[in-house]
Amino acid sequence: MKKRASTGTIEDLTPFFEDRCWMFVHLARQASIGVILRRGPSDWCRVTLWDTRRDKFQGGQWFHGRIYPDRCDISPDGRLFVYFAGKFNPRSEEKGYDRTWTAVSRPPYLTALALWPMGSTWGGEGVFLDNLTVRLGTNMPHWPHHPNHPPGPLRALGFAALKKGDPWHEAGPSFQNGWEAVLAPVNPNTTRATQPGEERLANWSSNGRRR
């Protein structure tokens, strides 16, 4: 892999495709910036920052655990990244992070500027309403943060803090960029009805484009 030492810019993307993996991209609404989440090999994830105007890539942090890309989001100006992750081991719980958590970082790194322990895979998503406001996937108006990772100037809201009918109440990640989730077809052989929150996504679509 060739790297430019001063900037960390990746000039050769061949290593990205040597191992079986998948990638998910979040694009900033007001900046030429994208965050690429790569999963693979195995239980490893990596964050890469994409300068979409110059088509340059900056390799970032590796994470040994699970990141849920459809529950992550990038701020409109591209400066912040909110992600839902889990390690599912006793050491994480001992440190007060629980098994899963939602955190805000500066991409392409995952060091938490703010963090909210969640504990399960229900909810946990983060959506930027603006550059300094994050809606968390919780039915509570406000969710307690980790004592070592206060939100600072960030404003964190739960569903209950938004008025009924507010378009941001049901907004998902990438909603601000015009992307909409496309549900996978329902299996007619399934005996149990699908409950809200259990729907499976086939892809994301915007004006006929897919990803």
Image: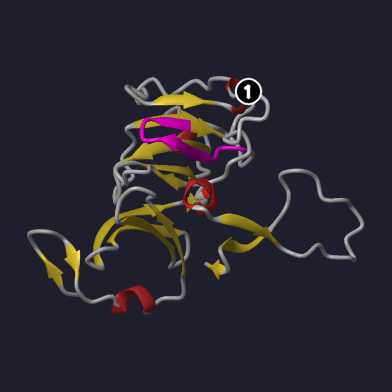
Locate residue 99 relative to residue 109 in the image: left or right.
right
Q: Position of residue 43 (x, y in %)?
A: 47, 59
Q: Position of residue 174 (x, y in %)?
A: 50, 50
- Going by the picture, which residue comes out furthest to the front? 207
Q: Position of residue 182 (x, y in %)?
A: 66, 60
Q: Position of residue 157 (x, y in %)?
A: 51, 25
Any magenta on residue 47? Answer: no
Locate residue 196 relative to residue 32 in the image: left or right.
right
Quadrant in the rendering for residue 131: top left
Can residue 97 be seen in this snapshot? no
- Residue 200 or 55: which is nearer the viewer? 55
Count how many numbered circles sit on residues in the image. 1
- Tell me the SS state at disc 1: loop
**The magenta stretch spans which residues?**
123-134
- Up the image or down, 120 lies above or below 37; here it is above
Residue of label 1: 163
Quadrant in the rendering for residue 200: bottom right
Question: Which residue corresponds to the image point at 54% horizontal and 69% vertical from the top-left?
Answer: 209
Any magenta on residue 129? Answer: yes
Locate residue 69 relative to residue 58 in the image: left or right.
right
Residue type beneath disc 1: Lys
Can residue 40 be seen in this snapshot? yes
- Up the image or down, 48 lies above or below 152; here it is below
Question: Which residue corresponds to the image point at 29% horizontal and 48% vertical from the top-left?
Answer: 109
- Going by the picture, which residue comes out furthest to the left? 6
